[in-house]
Image (cartoon, grey):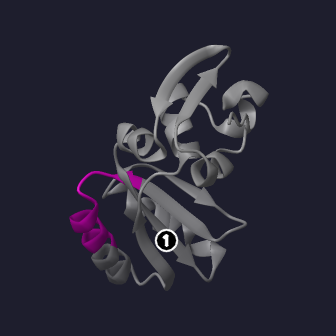
Amino acid sequence: MLLTTQYLDEADRLAADIVIIDHGTVIAAGTPSELKTRAGDDVIEVHVRNAAALPEVAAVLATVGRDPRTDLAMHRASVAVEDGTSRLMEAVRALDRVGVAVEDISLRRPTLDEVFLTLTGKPTDTAGPEAA
């Protein structure tokens, strides 16, 4: 069965093998797990109760990873990290030192949307329908 979709979370749940196409060119293929491994780093994700704390959270996350991202609507900041477990502990300690009230913090594998961003340099929502 062949499924075409631009919703990579749907592909992650339903597909055994995935081919990512960008502007008509195959840029990656493999199982969801293989593609996530290609993207490399784990992701630390921090949720805060007060969205006003996100710039401070992003500044802390920048010290443990690279290119932190914030989502104001979701009260979330995230950062890609190498050696996720030790970086997670560093982030927890640093957030505690600066007094940020964290609602939730987690370490996870990258999503396929993050894989696409890593491979193409652009998010899936701007890539057009041929993104997946």
The N terminus, quarter of image: top right
Q: Which residue is drawn at 60% across and 55% down?
A: 13
Residue 68 percent coordinates (x, y): 47, 53
Q: Which residue lies furthest to the right in this view?
A: 129
Is the stretch drawn in magenta largely helix, strand or loop?
Answer: helix
Q: Nearer the viewer, residue 20 or 56?
A: 20
Residue stretch rendered in magenta on the structure:
80-91
Q: Which of 121 and 61 is in front in this view?
A: 121
| Residue type beneath disc 1 | Val
The C terminus, quarter of image: top right
Query: Is disc 1 placed on a helix, strand or loop?
Result: strand
Asked if residue 39 is positioned above or below residue 122 in the image, the reply reads below
Q: Residue at x 48, y 35 (%)?
A: 118
Residue 84 percent coordinates (x, y): 28, 61
Figure disc tally: 1
Residue 20 percent coordinates (x, y): 58, 28
Asked if residue 2 is positioned above or below residue 72 in the image, the reply reads above
Determine which quarter of the picture holds residue 125.
Answer: top right
Image position of 70 (left or right of 78): right
Q: Residue at x 73, y 33 (%)?
A: 126
Q: Does the magenta stretch include residue 89?
A: yes
Q: How crowded is mark 1: few (under 14 residues within 10 Å), some or many (20 or more)?
A: many
Q: Name the residue under label 1.
A: 46
Asked if residue 44 is positioned above or below residue 118 in the image, the reply reads below
Q: Which residue is drawn at 73% across and 34% down?
A: 4
Q: Does the magenta stretch include residue 102?
A: no
Q: Which of 42 and 56 is in front in this view?
A: 42
Q: Which residue lies furthest to the front in this view?
A: 1
Image position of 19 (left or right of 89): right
Residue 98 percent coordinates (x, y): 38, 79
